[in-house]
Amino acid sequence: MSVERVMAPSSAGEPERHRTTVASGRERLRRGLTGGVILAAGAAAWWWLSTHHFGGLAGHGAPSDADAEATVAADANVVALPEAAAREVTLERAVLRPLRDQLTVPGRLDYDARRRLSYKSPVDGIVARVLVNVRQKVAKGEPLAEISSPDVGQARDDVRRREADRQIESKAADWAATIATNVDDLLDQLEGHPPLEQVESRFRDRVLGAYREKILAPYSRLLYVEKVIAGTQRLGAGGVLSGRIVEERTSNVEVARASFAAACEEARFETRQAHDRARAALEQADRLVQVARENLRTLVGSKLEADTAGAVTADAEESPGEVNALSALVLRTPFDGVVEEIFMARGERVQAGDPLFVVADTSTLWVQAQINERQWTQVELAEGQEVRVQVPGTVEHLAVARISHVGATVDEATRSVPLIAQLKNDDAHYKPGMFVWVALPEGTSREALAVPADAVLRHEGQAFVFVPEGDGRFRRVDVETGIESDGFVEVTSGIDAGREVVTRGGFVLKSELLLEDDQ
């Protein structure tokens, strides 16, 4: 209607206005059609997204599993693990426990000085055989090398000579003791004036030496004159013999008694003197043997070999004349260990004091630390006390050592008190020379909320823990920490007592969290 009204001509100028009106109408119609197309296209796009991408969100109005994962991913402090990985995570509750401040001092691992031997040649000689290799494990008493040395041969010969002399003196002492005992028994027996035949029969098989004659001859003479004087007294009383003969024979009896008594006293004294001299000679021989053995021990370094003066037998691979067994010195390790260094070769001439081997037992290491004199009064230490040791250069960097020695004085150079603790190293995990941190107890213990040290992680200077939220999700919670003692860390803020935290698996969660941040 309006178009017709516009198109009706009214004057001469109407044709131009008519053309303008028609053009503007066509433009409005074109714009309306374009807008409708755009609206229709938008509606179609919304329908496709709602049915294909959002899984029918427009139709149901509830978030799907993908929406939940997108929501978790949107929280930068939550990490989701698959069910299998989540089962590997270990949890432990934060609880109140007694903790004690600790003073951490630097230190280093070193050999146990009692279990490391720098073996030097005790004598001049020639290396006959090298029996071990570098890094070879050796047991106590196992041979390391063999050296041929004239000094050792002379020392062994001296021991054997002294032992032979001692055997001679021992036999002499036994002989003197036997004679002294038998002479004493004989003299005791003769006090009863038994018949000579009875005495000889009783002592026929007993050793008397020269004293058999020295004693029995005067005794026999005494028995004879006593028998003569008995007949003389009867004949003298009957007037058969003169008084002079009776007196002479009586005098003979007195002389015989005196002679026998002197022989007895002399025999008793001489046998005892001989026994004492033989015993003294035996003791002197023992001392000479001991001196010879000590001299040999200073050369061979083995008490067993010095006591037995035994010689070393060459192996089958050696020709019998190649090594003089009497002059051969076998160097043996005094403890179980490892040959760490060898400084000589077969056939090399060595002198006393030349280094030959280094054998060490690293199953126990020393932790050597220095406590500054200004900090000394803050710690409480005693022998046998356990201290925690951190070894940054190893995978298993936490260990426990036991204090064996605390210095009694302050070192003038470092102005510190030395401390030595023993660290078990049966698996050779730690090496001498490693740097360590030693945690020493300081002050008194106090109750504090704590979690295991493995539960506390750090990133960019911020300490945090992971707490479980269920369904394999774990949330990072920033915490403030305090003292660390005996494998636990004090938590001053961030979580409450009884809250579970991740102890094993925290590193995996941290890695996942940082990976998501990078994406």
Image: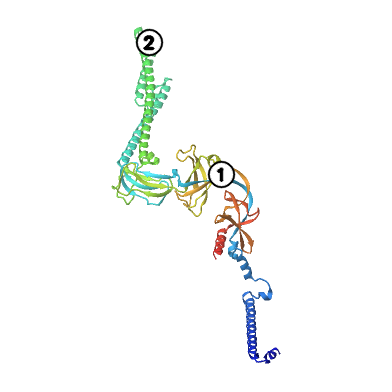
Coordinates of residue 305 in the picture (x, y in percent): 38, 41
- Near mark 1 (Cα within 10 A), the count class, few <14, some 14-19 or many ≥20, is many
- Near mark 2 (Cα within 10 A), the count class, few <14, some 14-19 or many ≥20, is some
Q: Quadrant of the N terminus?
A: bottom right
Looking at numbered disc 1 in the image, what kind of residue is underneath it?
A: Pro
Q: Residue 288 appears in which quarter of the rendering?
A: top left
For the point 65% across and 55% down, the residue is 499
**In this view, which residue lies farthest toward the right?**
1
Q: Is residue 225 visible?
A: no
Q: Residue 101 appears in which quarter of the rendering?
A: top right
Left or right: where does residue 332 sit relative to residue 63?
A: left
Q: Nearer the viewer, residue 462 or 336?
A: 462
Coordinates of residue 414 in the picture (x, y in percent): 46, 41
Coordinates of residue 411 in the picture (x, y in percent): 46, 39
Coordinates of residue 226 in the picture (x, y in percent): 38, 15
Left or right: where does residue 357 sit relative to residue 468?
A: left
Q: Residue 309 appears in which quarter of the rendering?
A: top left
Q: Provide the secondary structure element on which disc 1 rests.
A: strand
For the point 57% across and 58% down, the residue is 506
Q: Quadrant of the C terminus?
A: bottom right
Left or right: where does residue 156 sit relative to residue 48?
A: left
Q: Provide the secondary structure element on which disc 2 rests.
A: helix
What number is the disc on residue 235?
2
Looking at numbered disc 2 in the image, what kind of residue is underneath it?
A: Leu
Q: Nearer the viewer, residue 90 or 13?
A: 13
Per the image, the residue denoted by label 1 is: 441
Q: Nearer the viewer, residue 108 or 260?
A: 108
Whichever of callouts 2 and 1 sits on the residue coming sooner in the sequence is 2
Left or right: where does residue 215 sit relative to residue 464?
A: left
Q: Vertical placement of 430 versus 373: above or below?
A: below
